[in-house]
Amino acid sequence: CRDFLIQVQNIAKERGEKCPTKVTNQVFRYA
C-alpha cells in the first residue's frame, strides 16, 4: 500500500499540487 501511495504523491507532484489531499481521497475510493 505504501508503494501505491508513493506513486500517487509523485503524480501529485507532477501536477504541481502541494497538498494532494484530493488525490489521496480519489485513491482511497479506488482502493
Image (cartoon, rainbow, N blue to C red):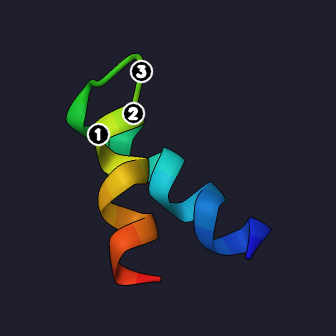
Under mark 3, the amino acid is: Cys
State the residue in front, 13 or 29.
29
Q: Which residue is mark 3?
A: 19
Under mark 1, the amino acid is: Lys
The residue lying at 73 percent from left, 76 percent from top is 1
State the residue in front, 2 or 15.
2
Residue at mark 2 to residue at mark 3: CA–CA distance: 4 Å
Residue at mark 2 to residue at mark 1: CA–CA distance: 6 Å
Under mark 2, the amino acid is: Pro
Q: Are marks 2 and 3 in contact (CB under 8 Å)?
A: yes
Q: Residues within 10 Å of mark 3 (few under 14, many from 20)?
A: few
Q: Which residue is mark 2?
A: 20
- Residue 18 spot, x, y in % from top left: 39, 16
Q: Seen from this angle, which residue lies furthest right?
A: 2
Residue at mark 3 to residue at mark 1: CA–CA distance: 8 Å
Based on the displayed image, in which of its 4 quarters is residue 4 positioned?
Answer: bottom right
Q: Which residue is mark 1?
A: 22
State the residue in front, 14 or 5.
5
The mark tally for this picture is 3
Helix, strand or loop at label 1? It is helix
Q: Seen from this angle, which residue lies furthest front?
A: 29
Helix, strand or loop at label 2? It is loop
The answer to whether residue 20 is above or below residue 8 is above
For discs 3 and 1, the disc positioned in front in the rendered view:
1
The residue lying at 37 percent from left, 52 percent from top is 25
